[in-house]
Image (cartoon, grey):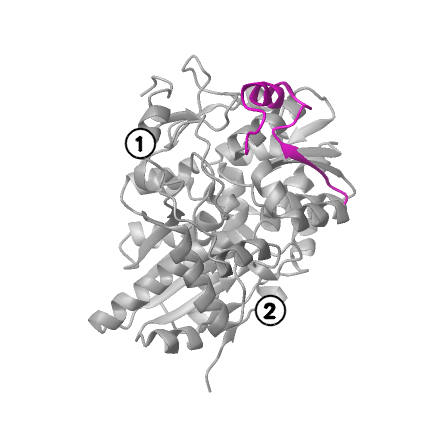
Amino acid sequence: MESYKITLSEKEIPQKWYNVQPDLITPLPPPLKPDGSPIGPQDLAPIFPMELIKQEVSQERWIEIPDEILNIYRIWRPSPLHRAYRLEKALGTPARIYYKNESVSPPGSHKPNTAVAQAYYNKQEGIMTLATETGAGQWGSALSFATKLLGMKCRVYMVRISYDQKPYRKILMQTWGGECFASPTDRTNAGRAILKQNPDSLGSLGIAISEAVEDAATHDDVKYSLGSVLNHVILHQTIVGLETKKQLKLAGEKPSVLIGCVGGGSNFAGFVFPFVKDKIDGKLDVEIIGAEPTACPTLTKGPYRYDHGDTAKMTPLMMMYTLGHDFVPPGIHAGGLRYHGDAPLLCSLVNDGVISAKAYHQVEVFDAAMLFAQTEGHLPAPETAHAIKCAIDEAKKCKETGEEKCIVFNYSGHGFFDLSSYLAYHEGKLEDYEYPEEKIRESIAKLPDIK
């Protein structure tokens, strides 16, 4: 009998997060101040609680998950691992395709894995209000969900183009008590400066981050919460990959290819990092691929340089692949992938050749999403569809070569609040966009001169 779903019991939820930092090939370059000197814990204290700062720099391989966080995780964890038999049949491939279904969380994505943890550690230190940014709205809704469960408040600066394209994400945030503002706003100095320069700005994650950081830095009772990129965020997301390892073992499988979409890097890194040490040690022969849009080709076209994580340069300088902190990508429907940089931990492993990346056009990504929805039944978020496109391409290669590879990807979120994107697809209004090389060079030329 075909097994479509590999599940774990609640008792099998991982009790510890995995920290990849001790297992990197090249130690992570430290975050820097604008003058080039290293950032210290005291510099981060105004915007982050101390426990998260400790996790950010920790060299401990395993970090215990507090019971209160595990109790909330049990609402949706462990998440299932599915075998995509119908997709395999449609492709006529000898490959075995699996996907880890993170869409089963109440907000519909992987984001609550870190939202709950961040809200918990802030509340432990007496903070009752969090400020954050969001692209497509998945992170904003996840943090609103987490803060509501923990009796806290949440303010969300949502990239304007996504605010307009995805109104139901805003409604979800409001349902869980979150305040949602279209960024750039007139609430902050950073937002007002952008609006003065361009009143019709579509916004960007870099701009929204600037606004949220400023909100936290200028209010003693508010801290900042980030949904991707930083080390502690990825740490919390490793519960995804740790569960996947257990489930693949139950299925009698070893992955040949691991795939995830990449915006800032949290869902992808959380999914693949638990497999990285085995690959580095030669115990697992696996290709690890990050899928990104051609409209925002950070890993595939950006240089590996120090840059700010936000447009107003309020965040520390981080060593990462970047398209430049003032890069404003076009308004593609995969709003969560419109970020100029990527997680330093992920970038380090890409730079060392452990992980590779591929970029895809918008229309072919939606073609892949449609095939997946029509075979497996699940409607993916546009971001997630990038991973599906990559998985389909890898499965087609197996059809050509006859290789029976085990392809596993992270189904990071559903597309129920992205139906306007699918409507545009059905009406033939989606356009491919490849960010011009000259625009990338122009943005990169403004990077800080720090090697």
Quadrant where the C terminus is found in the figure: top left
Q: Is residue 39 left or right of residue 255?
A: right
Q: Is residue 62 left or right of residue 109?
A: left
> Label 1, on which residue?
303
Element under label 1?
Answer: loop
Question: For the residue carrying disc 1, how many other residues have a C-alpha within 10 Å: few (<14), some (14-19), or many (20+)?
Answer: some
| Residue appearing at x 31%, y 27% in the figure | 441
Element under label 2?
Answer: loop
Does 343 appear above or below 238? above
Question: For the residue carrying disc 2, how many other residues have a C-alpha within 10 Å: few (<14), some (14-19), or many (20+)?
Answer: few
The span shown in magenta is: 177-202
Does 252 appear above or below 39? below
Q: Is residue 106 left or right of residue 281?
A: right
Measuring from the top left, give residue 406's x and y in whole percent. Answer: 34, 68
Spatial CA distance of label 1 from label 2 is 43 Å
| Residue appearing at x 50%, y 27% in the figure | 310
Measuring from the top left, give residue 7's x and y in whole percent. Answer: 55, 71
Name, please, the residue furthest toward the left: 401
Q: Which disc is residue 9 wearing?
A: 2
Amino acid type, residue under disc 2 in the picture: Ser
